[in-house]
């Protein structure tokens, strides 16, 4: 899988990361077990993609800002600049 991930995958991973920050680890195998426990994903490939992205999120932990959906949906530069002025956060 390339660097571009679908939004549904990111949303699931961010939700798991918010709810279980202490259980998410940099170990892919442990994250697979966590995904099995907390979701009802039937597909192995989707489970593995979620577990892999959780590894990426855990690696970015110190510099990670999980943006609200309103900011993620800002499509053009003008909207992003407007949101930056309102919130003080830059979402590229």
Image (cartoon, rainbow, N blue to C red):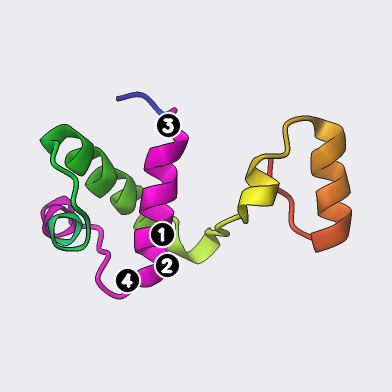
Q: How many marks?
A: 4
Q: Is residue 48 magenta?
A: no
The residue pinned by badge 1 equals: 15
SS at circle 3: loop
Going by the image, does 18 lie left or right of 70? left
First in sequence, mark 3 or 4: give its number. Answer: 3
Tag 2–tag 1 contact (CB < 8 Å)? yes
Residue furthest bottom in the image = 22
Q: Residue at x 25, y 38 (%)?
A: 49
The residue pinned by badge 2 equals: 18
First in sequence, mark 1 or 3: give its number. Answer: 3
Q: CA distance from mark 2 to mark 3?
A: 19 Å
First in sequence, mark 1 or 4: give its number. Answer: 1
Residue furthest top in the image = 2
Q: Is residue 22 above or below residue 40?
A: below
Residue 6 badge = 3
| Image coordinates for residue 8, horizontal then vertical, percent | 41, 39
The residue pinned by badge 4 equals: 20
């Amino acid at each position: 899988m390339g660097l571009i991930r679908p939004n549904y995958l990111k949303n699931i991973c961010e939700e798991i990361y918010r709810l279980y920050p202490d259980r998410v680890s940099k170990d892919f195998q442990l994250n697979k077990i966590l995904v099995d426990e907390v979701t009802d994903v039937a597909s192995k490939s989707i489970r593995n993609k979620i577990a892999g992205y959780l590894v990426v999120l855990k690696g970015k932990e110190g510099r990670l800002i999980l943006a609200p959906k309103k900011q993620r949906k800002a499509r053009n530069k003008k909207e992003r600049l407007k949101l930056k002025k309102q919130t003080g956060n830059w979402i590229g």
